[in-house]
Amino acid sequence: MDNAATSHNTRNNPAKALLSVVVPTLNEADNIAATLMNLENRCYEAQLCEIVLVDGGSNDSTLDVVQACIPRLEKRGLNMRIFRSKRGRAHQMNLGAEKAGGDILLFLHADTLLPPYFDTSIRNTLNAEHLTLGAFRLNTDKNTRSMQWICGCANLRTRLLALPYGDQALFIRRADFIRLHMFPALEIMEDFAFVRKVRRNRGKISLLTDAVVTSARRWRKRGYIFTSLCNQMMIMGYYLRIPTRILARWYRG
């Protein structure tokens, strides 16, 4: 069945709403196959999910890896569409949302794995009409004390401040995403700015008990302390209104 038709037919039945998983990629050849296979294995109702992958100009084999995954996904009944855009996660995710056919959007980083039956958990959460935005608890693929502490702080922040980040797999109804004017066109911190916008508009945010597993590659590469301090500096710089193009240059070194 066509995705648009599925979305139209399920709009009045949230339990059967089409879920569009929007995945921005940029040189993710080492991670994207595992992410796509995780989607295939962890999706409870594949017929009610689609993957919208938006590549920002990869110059490695990312798209070749993606193409190789398509037959297996389609055999499972999981449709995937691929788009190309200019570089920039905010732009890529907004384009994916525009192209998506679902009434529910899940924004998934290309190095993040979802928990079992993530689609059912998301639909059940958004059945509560007072909720606007949801996210999962954070875990990583490196189970050290340092990473446990970092993830614990992130999850505590989300519970106490209702401030999840993009690596926690944000999900939202498409109508609410459009109403809130999508992700701001920032070079970095687009997820932080969007969640703050949800809060300013008195939207309710839910943290699920299930956890995503995201890659700890940033911490492995740059060190636990430096990466954590760098993240906090980005937030401080954002509040000080330092242009995000400068913050992005600092962050990416």
Image (cartoon, helix red, strand yellow):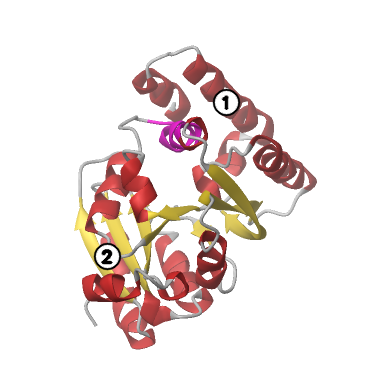
* 122 lies above or below 15: above
Please report the residue visible at 59 percent of the width from the left and 37 percent of the height from the top.
Answer: 163
Judging from the image, what secondary structure is the residue with disc 2 in?
A: loop
Prevalent SS, magenta region: helix
Quadrant in the rendering for residue 29: bottom left
Residue indicated by mark 2: 101
Please report the residue visible at 39 percent of the width from the left and 71 percent of the height from the top.
Answer: 17
Residue 126 percent location from the top left of the image: 51, 60
Residue indicated by mark 1: 230
Quadrant in the rendering for residue 3: bottom left
Do we see residue 60 in this rendering?
no
Please report the residue visible at 26 percent of the width from the left and 40 percent of the height from the top.
Answer: 87
Q: Which residues are magenta?
A: 188-197
Q: Earlier in the sequence, mark 2 or mark 1?
A: 2
As for residue 190 lying within the magenta part, the answer is yes
Tell me if 136 is positioned left or right of 174 in this view: right
Mark 2 crowd level (few <14, some 14–19, many ≥20, 10 Å Cα):
many
Residue 227 percent location from the top left of the image: 60, 32
* 158 lies above or below 5: above
Please report the residue visible at 40 percent of the width from the left and 31 percent of the height from the top.
Answer: 188
Quadrant in the rendering for residue 51: bottom left
